[in-house]
Image (cartoon, coloured by chain):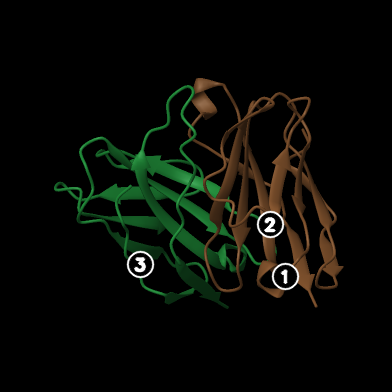
Chain colours: A green, B brown
Amino acid sequence: DAKTTQPPSMDCAEGRAANLPCNHSTISGNEYVYWYRQIHSQGPQYIIHGLKNNETNEMASLIITEDRKSSTLILPHATLRDTAVYYCIVRVAISSGSARQLTFGSGTQLTVLP
Amino acid sequence: GAGVSQSPRYKVAKRGQDVALRCDPISGHVSLFWYQQALGQGPEFLTYFQNEAQLDKSGLPSDRFFAERPEGSVSTLKIQRTQQEDSAVYLCASRSSDPIKYNEQFFGPGTRLTVL
């Protein structure tokens, strides 16, 4: 799985958009970008994933650059409850019978400020 | 619609003691993963089950670590002769066989193990 690079920490004002960057310059054509987050004292939680098109769900939007070497997770209106460590993970899509465990880096500690 | 549960939430062990950590996955989830998370680090893969079969144990750090899932549901991670370096949060995750949800792992809250 390709390696990712994320800033160790970021702050965001409550109610503003939080934009979390991730570099994955060695991504392969069949590798997806996944985002998970981990709130303090909880297990990681899936947010979103994508291959090359931008994706949006009820939690966030994922913007992947055209060359797929970087991506940005956007939380459109950050709340205090969004304070967490955000992990960007690149891997091939899992298939039936494939273990495909997640390989976490150190992530970005996002702190939403009141 | 209960999520993944783990017990105990906290465990303190004296060095050399054996411990057993339990994971109850989401009902019907075929795949089950164990991860170890050291303080300030991301989780690291330990082992993977598909039903009762342990298909990958490449992440287990030593032969003191043993995992089982005898009936394909509940899983137990056992650590024998605990050492201080075993102190960490142990996370369990399960995954559905539903193709729509196949890309998502559901994590439990973890068990924080402290070895004195």
Kind of residue sitting beneath label 2: Tyr
Mark 2 lies on a secondary structure that is strand
Mark pair 2, 3: CA separation = 24 Å
Q: Name which residue type carries label 3.
A: Gln
Q: Residues at marks 2 and 1, common chain?
A: yes
List the residue tagged with mark 2: B90
Residue at 72% x, 54% y is B109
Q: Nearer the viewer, mark 2 or mark 3?
A: 2
Q: Which residue is mark 1?
A: B83
Q: Give how far across and how far down residue A87 sits, in percent.
A: 45, 58
Label 1 and label 3 in one chain: no
Q: Is residue B76 above or below residue A95?
A: below
Identify which residue is drawn at 49% across, 23% down.
A97
Residue A102 position within the rendered picture, expressed as x and y whole percent measured from the top left: 48, 47
How far apart are the alpha carbons under marks 2 and 1? 15 Å
Label 3: how many Cα within 10 Å (few below 14, some 14–19, many 20+): some
Chain letter for the residue marked with disc 1 in the picture: B
Q: Give SS at disc 3.
A: loop
Chain letter of disc 2? B
Residue at image coords 82%, 59%: B9
- Please name the residue that numbered disc 3 is placed on: A6
Residues at badges 2 and 3 in contact (C-beta under 8 Å)? no
Q: Position of residue B24 (x, y in %)?
A: 78, 39
